[in-house]
Image (cartoon, rainbow, N blue to C red):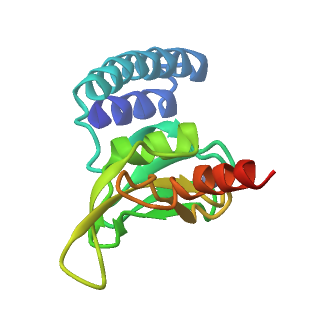
Amino acid sequence: MTAVWSEKQAAIETGQMTIEKFIDGLYGEVSRLVESADINISATENQTPKTSLDRLTVKCPSCNSDLVMTAKACNCIGCKFRIRLELRGKKLTSKQIETIISKGKSSEIKGFKSKKNDSTYSMFVTLANKETGELGFEYPPRDDSQSSKKPSTKNMSRELKS
Ligand SMILES: [Zn+2]
């Protein structure tokens, strides 16, 4: 193609070809290139594999940008919002992160490791700070706890006194 163009340039110089004709030819060449380039681009887009970073289906609660999962955290691409996945010996999944962000609270998650002993426990993870991604925790009521029985005992004793 370069050879053809230089031939044309030579033709212009010798007066065998007008500038207008040359430019017309140039436009034709360029538009053909653009057309074929268009086809190439769309074909590439269709074949593009998914990026290694997982994008969450929910948006950043602080700035509404996309959230991406890395190995250690869920990061916002638009602000400082960041949720660390590693939590008390357990790693949160992207599904759990999505629930925490969309509902403000996860369902009960099991398998957190207690620092005092080797036992594990379950709790709810909440989104304590929507701007930084800081997490909060809620513990489910215990079945065998006496605390749930105490109020009724108090009520009973009060009823007996009055
Ligand atoms: Zn954000």
Q: Would residue 54 be visible to someone looking at this image?
A: no
Looking at the image, residue 40 sits to the left or right of residue 135; the answer is left
> Where residue 82 sits in the image (x, y, percent)?
52, 63
Residue lying furthest bottom? 116
Query: Dividing the picture into quarters, in which one does residue 2 lie?
Result: top left
> Where residue 102 sits in the image (x, y, percent)?
55, 37
Residue nearer the viewer, 105 or 116: 116
Residue nearer the viewer, 68 or 143: 143
Residue lying furthest right? 162
Q: Is residue 11 above or below residue 82?
A: above
Q: Residue at x 58, y 44 (%)?
A: 104
Number of marks present in the image shown:
0
Looking at the image, residue 149 sits to the left or right of residue 70; the answer is right
Q: Is residue 153 above or below residue 87?
A: above
Residue lying furthest left? 118
Q: Residue at x 34, y 72 (%)?
A: 88
Residue lying furthest front? 161
Looking at the image, residue 129 sits to the left or right of residue 55; the answer is right
Q: Is residue 39 above or below residue 55?
A: above
Quarter of the image where the N terminus is located = top left
> Where residue 31 sits in the image (x, y, percent)?
46, 17
Q: Would residue 143 be visible to someone looking at this image?
A: yes
> Where residue 40 sits in the image (x, y, percent)?
29, 24
Residue nearer the viewer, 126 or 91: 126
